Image (cartoon, grey):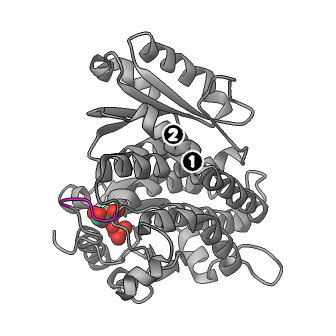
Amino acid sequence: DASDLEKGTYPYYMLKEIDEQPAVMRNIIQRYQNAEGRLTVPEELVTAMLEADRIHIVACGTSYHSGWVGKHYLEKIAQIPTEVHVASEFSYNPPLLKGNPFFIFLTQSGETADSRQVLVKVKEWGYPALTITNVAGSTLSREADYTLLLHAGPEIAVASTKAYTAQIAVLAVLSDALGAKIGHDMGIDMVHELGIVANAMEAIIDDKERIAELADIYLPNTRNAFYIGRGLDYFVSMEAALKLKEISYIQTEGFAAGELKHGTIALIEEGTPVLAIITQADMASHTRGNIEEVRSRGANTCVFAMDGLANDNDQIILPAVHPALAPLMTVVPTQLMAYYATLHRGYDVDKPRNLAKSVTVE
Ligand code: G6P
């Protein structure tokens, strides 16, 4: 049928959408760049956000995970305290709202009922809201005061890939635009650095056979697995774990590397796969310590480390990018790990059981 034609030579939409990510990064740069080459968002949005004393990001699923990376940018670059909420929890257990809160709804589809329910309340309370979405004219876009589009093209596979990286890139663009206004940019030339990220993604995708091999070695017949990391690498670990469990049905936890020892390490036994992400220089040796802790208890460890922080015996050495933008790049091999682990198990990558692309009921 027509939808199969769009897949072209790809066996699954998920692989096509993983492959599209470098182009999506370049498209986002282009769409948000002004004539002088600076990244910009509408001036009214900048003004409204700089009046806020706190930002609340509200989202579900994969979008919730990109929210954590967004919090890092909004706090570090735009200097605005930011909280991240699961939409279904916010609805019945909202945080204390004081002063001038500003809301950001992250939603690929723009139709998720749990997120919409919060937006309806936020508008009743009279607070300003921005929706970051892939779908122009979607419900959450229409009902918010502001919209920023992901420009990622339609995402068909149930497991979200390019929308996650597009959300992070748009949050980086937004933070950069806010930072420029207040004269604070962390020394990042965002256009340049996002371009480097696109090239790094491409290099990883070109080498996907290597990830297919690793999926065979580390995730063969296992029932469970762990992703660990610290800081931004922890946020990616949460998304990496979600991706793996969604489509391969391997029970996977994304864990803060230093927190494992406070309980969860009890689950490590002979052969348990533990995949570790290392991209942040100030935390690298600490994460390495945590890798040793689980290895000495029998874990089968697989290390994804960024060039410059890598050891010779690490399984994957990722191209160097600006450390703040590392999540955009490190998530790609984890998407591919999930894809190949699922292929090897013989499941339908694009249509995992029990899941829908967009959940429009509470
Ligand atoms: C569903 C999908 C997830 C997605 C979540 C949020 O549960 O299966 O992949 O992350 O909804 O979707 P949204 O469109 O709001 O980003």
Q: Quadrant of ligand 1?
A: bottom left
The location of residue 125, given as percent across then percent down, is 29, 74
Q: Are marks 2 and 1 in contact (CB under 8 Å)?
A: yes
Residue kind at label 1, given as amino acid type: Glu
Whether residue 221 is visible to the viewer of this picture, yes or no, is yes
View extreme (top): residue: 296
**Dot 1, how many residues are within 10 Å of its Cα: few (below 14), some (14-19), or many (20+)?**
few
Residue at horizontal 16 percent and vertical 68 percent from the top: 362
* Residue that label 2 marks: 213
**Mark 1, residue position:** 209
| Nearer the observer, 3 or 125 | 3
Query: Considering the numbered disc 2 on the image, is that residue within a helix, a strand or a loop?
Result: helix
Indicate whether residue 179 is drawn in magenta.
Answer: no
Q: Is residue 352 magenta?
A: yes
Instruction: Give me the C-alpha separation between circle 2 and circle 1.
Output: 6 Å
Residue type, numbered disc 2: Glu
